[in-house]
Amino acid sequence: MSHPKFEQTLVVLKPDAIQRSLIGEIIKRFERVGLKMVGIKMFVPTGEFIEKHYTFDPSWKRKAGEKSIKGFLEKGIPAPTDNPLEAGERILDSLRAYLSSGPVIAMVWQGAHAVPLVRKLVGGTEPHSSDVGTIRGDFVLDSYVLSSGDNRSIRNLIHASGNEEEAEQEIPHWFSKHELIDYRLVQEAIIYE
Ligand code: CDP
Ligand code: MG
């Protein structure tokens, strides 16, 4: 097993993060916690590319649908459908449109516990209920009720791998091996040694 300091995770700044000029603000948070950027690129993804990204996990559609239905019920509002798979299918349709609507910035960040650490900094899926101090909690106000009412994806600025298995599937989808750089940051000596 490799040392935990080599753990890698995928982060994608979604089109709303670019359009709201939050690139530096978001990158700063990963830098200052002590993570190391090992790959970065900007491009406009196709709808097919986005669909593949979200369907590595065959149960994602159902889980995303369940989360969305729960978000409605917690607010005492009836969900548009009570079928998680149908809700998940709608989410995927709107994600395809949202994430291929303009440039995104994809990055790979490396460091100890990179996957859960980045999720902690990013915050929960729905900005309305994500914690204060997280990226989604601090810079955006969208809710499930607002986004489904307007028939679009929730604007939450950022994608981050949900667990190590997801990271292992997602990183090679976004980056080829030679686009990831193996180098030493001076600060690693004080963080790890
Ligand atoms: O991004 P995260 O891992 O927190 O959430 P997810 O459940 O894997 O869903 C992926 C993305 O789908 C979210 O980040 C949202 O952009 C979108 N989504 C949505 O628009 N509406 C929902 N009810 C659920 C997810
Ligand atoms: Mg996810």
Image (cartoon, rainbow, N blue to C red):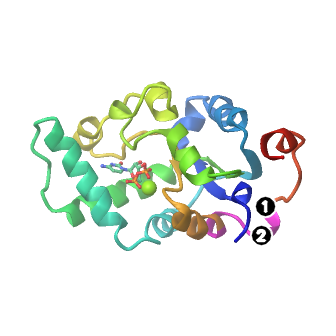
Q: Which of the image's four quarters has the N terminus? A: bottom right
Dominant SS type (magenta): helix
Pinpoint residue 154: horizontal percent, then vertical percent: 37, 42
Task: Name the residue carrying label 2.
Answer: 177
Callout 1, which amino acid?
A: Leu
Magenta-colored span = 172-180
| Residue 80 falls left or right of residue 140 | left
Pinpoint residue 59: horizontal percent, then vertical percent: 34, 70
- Mark 2 Cα shell of 10 Å, populated few (<14), some (14-19), many (≥20): few
- Mark 1 lies on a secondary structure that is loop
Does the Cβ of the disc 1 residue fall within 8 Å of ligand 2?
no
**Does residue 113 show up magenta in the picture?**
no
In the image, what residue occupies the spot 27% across and 35% down? 146
| Residue 169 falls left or right of residue 148 | right
Task: Name the residue carrying label 1.
Answer: 180
Q: Is residue 105 visible?
A: yes
